[in-house]
Image (cartoon, helix red, strand yellow):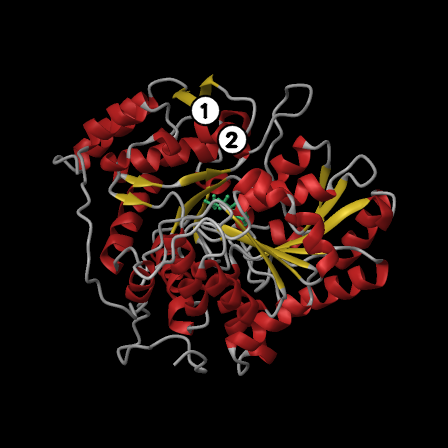
Amino acid sequence: MSDCSYTRVTFFSGENVPLEMHKARMVQRVHLIPIKERFEVLNRTGNNTFLLPNRDVFLDMLTDSGVNAMSEAQYAAMLMADDSYAGSETFYRLEKTIRDFFGLEYFLPAHQGRACENILASTYVTPQTPTVITNYHFTTTKAHIMLRGGQVLEAISDAGLMTESDLPFKGNYDLDKFDALVKQAGGPAKIAFVRIEAGTNLIGGQPVSLDNMRQVSAYCRKNGLRLVYDASLLADNLFFIKTREKECQNRPLADLVKEIASLMDIIYFSGRKLGCARGGGICAANKVEYLRLRDLVPLYEGFLTYGGMSVREMEAMAVGIRETLDIHNISQTPLFVEALGKELEALNVPVVTPYGGLGCHVDASRFVPHIPQVEYPAAALCSAIYLVSGVRGMERGTLSESRNPDGSEHLSNMELVRLAIPKRVFTHSQIKFAADRIGWLYRNRSLIGGLTFEDEPKTLRFFLGRLKPIGDWQERLMAKYLGDMPSGL
Ligand code: F0G
């Protein structure tokens, strides 16, 4: 039942509840530790949710990367893997699956998405072609381009950066801006590649429409520009194309994927997201591009028939990619993001709208407007959310940016806390719990203060940086919480 025209099951009562289209047959115990312990853990781990041990986390909403629940068919396939360094049957099965899925001829395996970005940036970003144009950057993508002396220009429309909106495709290219950026870069000859990111991560998992992709592709073909598609978040984007883009509502998902792929020269993805496994890969439409990219795979990743992945992960990824064509599979994250968004909005908590894929994004600029951007409002809110709920989110704001060359802060366009919804992992009551505690925090938001660095790494500082609260706001927040919830849970 992969390409049915309906995408959600409605309740006769009219209540809007995301219905799980799976049942749990294996579970993991999670622990909700009291606030005093959470306070200690937070300060031991530099107020950085990346550094929290999972044993101290109740709901891990850091990311969906590599933590989506896998299906029984994926686990079954892992037992059948053919373990060989060279020429394993497993690789050929994966290669065939990817060829059938995208309709592109050539496939190169890599150990994860950023490994693909390394290969693409190493190949195409040169002193003669230093520029990459994208709808919006992703952290690791930009870091690889910058590492090679390149620059990233963004063609997202101004409306895409508004956190409150009813635009269905906020990840879309602004085509006039795109044309102006091509000229600003010095023309097509100076451009390494043009990139479209599906389900635009850093602006709240916002999709790109098929129609917009067609237009960007037509421009690239007319002007001899190489078009690269980051399909890591394709599953969510596909759901939104199917449900929000009128002409696509009756088209099979397989057909939509093939049309998207036909518009691109190169597609790469993180298999930690697409395919709900671990790993990644690059697909190319023609042999010339394939051969340019190919030689770096054995150098950085591993032999061409595994590229740094275990055979078990390759088997799981192949099945997971095929399952992307089931509407009731790809609907789960968007419907649960919507459920969390609605619960939060009912408690007046500002969230990014329309609800996107990947996770529910709380707007820290509106939640804690009293915290200046140089004191990392989104990171402060992220630590406060953990403190009052045991929920681990991820900062997506100024902390996730790199400093300017002169050492000043590069202030982010948005200050967001992402509450990721890995596929099929959380129940509806867990979603309601998260919303309840964040709603409490919103009522007490004036108590939240900023953060400052104790230890700031030079590259991708958000991963390993350690921060401390400015003043004693966390003690005061904890005291208020214990007044309202004496158990501390
Ligand atoms: N592109 C996008 C759009 C991503 O979201 C990610 C990863 C990557 C590339 C890199 O892939 O992790 O396999 O190396 N996003 C993760 C996240 C880290 O949490 O959103 P990777």
Is label 1's Cβ within 8 Å of ligand 1? no
Dot 1 corresponds to which residue?
465
The residue at 52%/62% (across/down) is: 95
Circle 2 residues within 10 Å: few <14, some 14–19, many ≥20: many
Between residue 170 and residue 367, name the one nearer to us.
170
**Whether residue 193 is situated above or below residue 387 in the rendered picture:** below
**Whether residue 425 is situated above or below residue 413 in the rendered picture:** below
For residue 441, what is the image quadrant? Answer: top left
The residue at 74%/66% (across/down) is: 215
For residue 451, what is the image quadrant? Answer: top left
Any part of residue 439 in sight: yes
> Which amino acid, mark 2?
Leu
Report x, y in % for residue 147.
66, 31
What quarter of the picture does the C terminus occupy? top left
Dot 2 corresponds to which residue?
399
Report x, y in % for residue 474.
31, 25
Q: Which one is closest to the eye, mark 2 or mark 1?
A: 1
Report x, y in % for residue 438.
32, 44
> Which amino acid, mark 1?
Gly
**Whether residue 128 is situated above or below residue 81 in the rendered picture:** above
Of pointers 2 and 1, the one earlier in the residue sequence: 2
Question: What kind of element bears circle 1?
Answer: loop
Question: What kind of element bears circle 2?
Answer: helix
Please indicate whether residue 42 sits to the left or right of residue 136 in the image.
left
Is label 2's Cβ within 8 Å of ligand 1? no
- How many numbered marks appear? 2
Whether the residues at callouts 2 and 1 have beta carbons within 8 Å, the answer is: yes
Determine the CA span between mark 2 and mark 1.
9 Å
In the image, farthest residue toward the left:
487
What quarter of the picture does the N terminus occupy? bottom left
Residue 59: which disc?
none
